[in-house]
Image (tube, grey):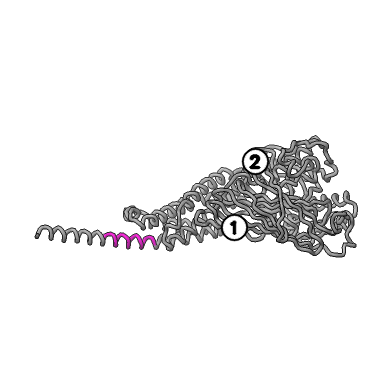
Amino acid sequence: MTQPNKTSRRLRRALLLGGVVVVLLLAFTGYQALKAKTALEQVAADFETLTGQLPGGDQAGAESTLASAQRHAGDAFDNTRGPVWWLSSKLPEVGPNVDAVRVVAEVADRLASDVLPDVVTAAGTLTPGNLRPVRGRVDLEPIQQIEPAVVRAATALSAESREVDDIDTSRLVSQIAAPVSQLQTRIADADELADRASRAVRLLPPMLGADGERSYLFMFQNNAEIRATGGIPGAFAIITANDGKVTLGRQGDAGTVGRFEKPPTPLTDQERALFGEDLGRFPQDVNFTPDFPRTAELIAGMWEARKGQQVDGVVSTDPVALSYILNGTGPVETAGGRTLTAEGAVPLLLSQVYAEIPDPEKQNDFFNAAAGSVFDAVAAGTGEPRIVLDSLSQAASERRVLIWSARRGEQRLLAPTALAGGLETRATTAPEVGVYFNAALPYKLDYYLDYEVSVESTRCQGSRQRLTVKVRMQSRAPRDLASFTDYVAPDVPAYPRGSIVDTLYFFAPVDGSHVALSVDGQDRGYDVQRLDGRDVFATSVVVEPGKTRSLTVHLVSGPGQVDEPTLRVTPGVRSDGIGTVGASSCPELG
């Protein structure tokens, strides 16, 4: 009996000793983890500060913040090393938390030491002041010099962001999950910023003529007669870029391009079925499609057929974007002694001009002059470059500035950006819904249309989401139309004069489908068609002066699209048209 008792006592002592070791191990690891947690929270704060300083051109502040991030990241790294951490990572429940902290600390240290210095240095070159044109020319040499460092940093940031993003915070205790989630967000933000910079330094020099002269077709969209990408193309011009110097050349309107008996660029059967042959025959209708790269191909083909000139790309904007830019340049004098201001440009260009200049051809001349005046102000470096660049960024985010390059390599770099304005045709985990407007009548009444589109995820079925899209349309047109010319509000027998008549195109997510449509609470039938792999249907809505209409569409996302939905809408006169976007109803699958 004695021997078993001794063995039992030894076993208890060993277990007790092991328990003490584990407790001490956990205590020591917890102490270091607390220090690492504090350091990582400070790193996250530093990264957030940097993402604000870099675009703002605060070079001195960014360098100081970088030094702080390096110090804090080094502390986090030092406090997550050693055999104690290795042993702790093997313990059940504790292990995932230990591994997460170690990975984040390693990534933060590599970013702060090896990646962000290149980003900060590059940001010093890409300040608004350095990008400001001087006598109409942007100095491209500094941009070309920093390109390798920016691309290298963006590539490294992308890899680090993926590694951190792979950490499943749902398995971590709250004290660890919070700083890890913070850093996931901050590193993702830095990754996005670096990616934009990488694309910019690769695109700006060649597109601005570093390797030889480039010619671009400039298209001015008129939102008073709505089209899927913004408004009817009324005015055109040629922009020439050579070694950073950009000049505005010959100008014209849709009439100078003219109509075609057959589309110079052949249409697909799907395009004909959805938009009709006019998409490829009339320059005013090339943006019936919401896919701007396709619009650009069509108008470039028309320009070549009519003018005998191949262009290197197409650039498009609208009066709202010009009004944003005027915030930076200040008021600009234009044709007829008129002054363009940030507050007055939109009503002048989309409403007053029709009362003051009755002749449509002279109206287009005025549009060209207005666009030319703002172009000249930007090219001359007038005003505050920071505000000008911020204004251009806002216009791009609302898809009011669109760019297409005829060079395939450049277009591949543009494609993922808002500047490209392409129709999404590849499925991602986020279901994308598209709602686009096209005027069904030749008028200029869409200046008076306000609309808002919202999407809500109402149910999760397997890995698909049920989505409800709501559209509210309101006419601001006055009931007394005596001051409107027939050009603005033509007398159409089928509708009360002054009615806004738009055709709305509803694009289901990639691999998704439509379920139902109602207008003002009444069910309405529809015919589903296809465009580039997306289900789409069109329905026309009449909005009489002062009236409001509402539409509701029920959709189903594609399989595996479990993240928060995204929404693309034709930008309007007074807003981008996007209302609320609800959270995913499949959060546990995302």
User: Label 2 crowding class (10 Å Cα cut-off): few <14, some 14-19, many 20+?
Assistant: some
Of marks 2 and 1, the one in the foreground: 1
Q: Which residues are magenta?
A: 21-33
Residue at 37% across, 60% down: 32
Q: What type is the residue that disc 2 sits on?
A: Glu
Q: Which mark is residue 498?
A: none
Q: Is residue 45 magenta?
A: no
Q: Is residue 575 left or right of residue 190?
A: right
- According to the picture, the residue beneath numbered tag 2 turns out to be 410
Distance between the alpha carbons at the discs numbered 2 and 1: 36 Å
Query: Measured along the vertical axis of the image, is residue 144 above or below residue 467?
Result: above
Q: In the rendering, at what x and y percent does residue 227 appear?
A: 76, 50
- According to the picture, the residue beneath numbered tag 1 turns out to be 457
Q: In the rendering, at what x and y percent does residue 502 appear?
A: 77, 54
Q: Is residue 124 left or right of residue 380?
A: left
Please state which of residues 211 and 433 is positioned toward the viewer in this rendering: 433
Pick the quarter of the image with the N terminus. bottom left
User: Label 1 crowding class (10 Å Cα cut-off): few <14, some 14-19, many 20+?
Assistant: many
Number of numbered markers: 2
**Residue 364 visible to an observer of this rendering:** yes
Q: Is residue 25 magenta?
A: yes
Q: In the rendering, at what x and y percent does residue 235 appear?
A: 81, 48
